Image (cartoon, helix red, strand yellow):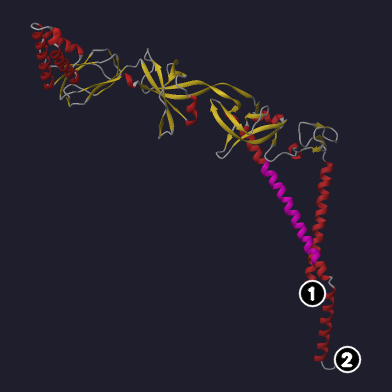
């Protein structure tokens, strides 16, 4: 029981020390606060309102909060979670720029890049129709401009000799029949054979100039010339002197570049904006020149590698400004739907959500979660989260976001520590009160007296003469 009494005494002393310290600490804080000078009074809801005297805020009816010397005015404000207050000087230092949200529509400019390709409908391949070898090649490397019927190379093949003999035989037959019978009735079969043999010479690779010369001279030639089928540019050449070739080998690939294709990469949600026939501005950055193209009637093709749609544009290229494999800048206008649109730099995208900082009052910036729609160049539409007339931050929002996070952590820590201190004080007080009640319990006091009496009685019984000594 002595231990219980000792514990109670210790707890009582601890409680007294705690109360004394708390009272003295509160007194020191009160004295320290009283010694500070009040600079001004602010509206807790609207920090732009300041007064030299205490009173009531005219807009919200709340009591004005004093701001002491050396104290941050933001600590006196009752801001929404995540909101932050920045005075004009701090806004100037971090470069804050604010813009009003407006309901707008009209033309939007979309910019992307494209790659020039040869028009497949104007691409020609000069190929081998028989086996043989190359006798000679003209000076027509890749990128060379060639004219129609210009000689490209000279080849030899025994199949040409056989086809030439058949062609000359059909010509002789036609000439013989025309000299004896009526041409209207009897020359048709012979003319058909001549056309068949002529087509065979073309299939083997003989050009029109040499076919006409063969029909005029009636002389079989050993070497056959390969001629350019069009006016164009040599895109590729895979032939050299003395080279052996087989049927189907490609000698030249020649393209008419007066009309080219441009392939642009677009996202799926932007495909509906590129309507067939739409005009697109094409800029060759290296040459600082601009031409125009139109969107093809063919639908875009999906590319699994880039996960984009390949949109085809058609452009006239009379000066051959555009060459295959050249990259160009594309820019076209589209009609944007009427609604809320804001600059893309105003949005902070964390991957999980998109946030815009809204200026709710002078110097107070509040984070707002938004849902965005279609992007138009430097702007993006907002489907939810903003209304017309609100003011949003378009520059300095990264620093405001950092300031908001720092203030939120400070508020959280300051709100947690007083709670823990108060809980500890209540717990100590409860323990002290329980200890005091325990030591003052009547039943426990009676039990202690009985135990003491019984202990004295046992002591007298064990010691001889103790009882008599007590009486004496």
Residue drawn where x is 42% and y is 33% of the image: 306
Circle 1 sits in a helix, a strand or a loop, which is it? helix
| The N terminus sits in image quarter | bottom right
Looking at the rendering, which quadrant does residue 401 occupy? top right
Residue on which the image places disc 2: 469
Residue on which the image places disc 1: 2
Q: Residues within 10 Å of mark 1 (few under 14, many from 20)?
A: few
Circle 2 sits in a helix, a strand or a loop, which is it? helix
Residue 410 painted magenta: yes
Residue 425 painted magenta: yes
Give the image location of residue 453, x and y in percent.
84, 83
Looking at the rendering, which quadrant does residue 45 occupy? top right
1 or 2: tag closer to the N-terminus: 1
Residue drawn where x is 78% and y is 62% of the image: 430
Give the magenta-colored segment's residue range.
407-434
Give the image location of residue 26, x and y in percent.
81, 50
Give the image location of residue 416, x and y in percent.
71, 50
Instruction: Between label 1 and label 2, give the one nearer the viewer.
Output: 1
In the rendered structure, the answer to whether residue 382 lies left or right of residue 257 reads: right
| The C terminus sits in image quarter | bottom right
């Amino acid at each position: 029981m002595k231990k219980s009494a000792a514990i109670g005494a210790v707890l009582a002393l601890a409680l007294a020390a705690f109360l004394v310290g708390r009272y003295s600490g509160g007194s020191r804080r009160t004295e320290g606060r009283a010694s500070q000078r009040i600079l001004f009074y602010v509206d807790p809801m609207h920090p732009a309102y300041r007064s030299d005297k205490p009173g009531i805020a005219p807009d919200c009816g709340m009591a004005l909060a004093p701001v002491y010397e050396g104290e941050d005015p933001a600590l006196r404000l009752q801001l929404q979670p995540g909101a932050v207050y920045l005075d004009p000087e701090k806004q100037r230092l971090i470069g804050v720029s604010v813009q009003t949200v407006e309901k707008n529509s009209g033309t939007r400019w979309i910019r992307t890049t494209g790659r020039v390709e040869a028009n497949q409908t104007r691409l020609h391949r000069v190929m081998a129709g028989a086996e043989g070898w190359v006798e000679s090649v003209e000076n027509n490397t890749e990128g060379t401009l060639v004219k129609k019927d210009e000689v490209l190379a000279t080849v030899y093949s025994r199949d040409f000799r056989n086809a030439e003999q058949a062609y000359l035989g059909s010509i002789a037959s036609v000439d013989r029949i025309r000299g004896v019978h009526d041409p209207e009735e009897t020359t048709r079969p012979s003319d058909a054979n001549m056309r068949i043999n002529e087509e065979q010479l073309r299939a083997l690779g003989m050009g029109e100039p040499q076919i006409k010369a063969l029909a005029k001279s009636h002389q079989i030639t050993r070497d056959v010339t390969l001629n350019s089928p069009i006016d164009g540019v040599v895109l590729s050449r895979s032939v050299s002197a003395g080279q052996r070739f087989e049927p189907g080998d490609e000698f030249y690939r020649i393209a008419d570049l007066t009309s080219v294709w441009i392939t642009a990469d677009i996202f799926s949600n932007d495909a509906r904006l590129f309507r067939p026939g739409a005009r697109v501005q094409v800029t060759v950055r290296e040459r600082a020149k601009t031409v125009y193209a139109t969107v093809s009637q063919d639908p875009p093709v999906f590319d699994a590698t880039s996960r984009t749609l390949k949109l085809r544009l058609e452009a006239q290229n009379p000066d051959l400004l555009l060459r295959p494999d050249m990259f160009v800048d594309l820019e076209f206008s589209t009609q944007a739907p009427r609604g809320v649109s804001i600059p893309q730099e105003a949005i902070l995208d964390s991957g999980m959500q998109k946030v815009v900082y809204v200026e709710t009052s002078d110097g107070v910036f509040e984070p707002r979660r938004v849902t965005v729609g279609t992007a138009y160049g430097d702007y993006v539409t907002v489907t939810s989260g903003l209304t017309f007339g609100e003011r949003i931050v378009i520059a300095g929002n990264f620093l405001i976001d950092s300031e908001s996070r720092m203030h939120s952590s400070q508020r959280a820590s300051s709100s947690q520590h007083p709670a823990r201190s108060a809980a500890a004080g209540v717990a100590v007080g409860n323990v002290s009160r329980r200890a005091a009640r325990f030591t003052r319990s009547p039943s426990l006091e009676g039990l202690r007296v009985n135990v003491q009496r019984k202990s004295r009685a046992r002591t007298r019984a064990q010691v001889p003469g103790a009882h008599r000594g007590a009486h004496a």
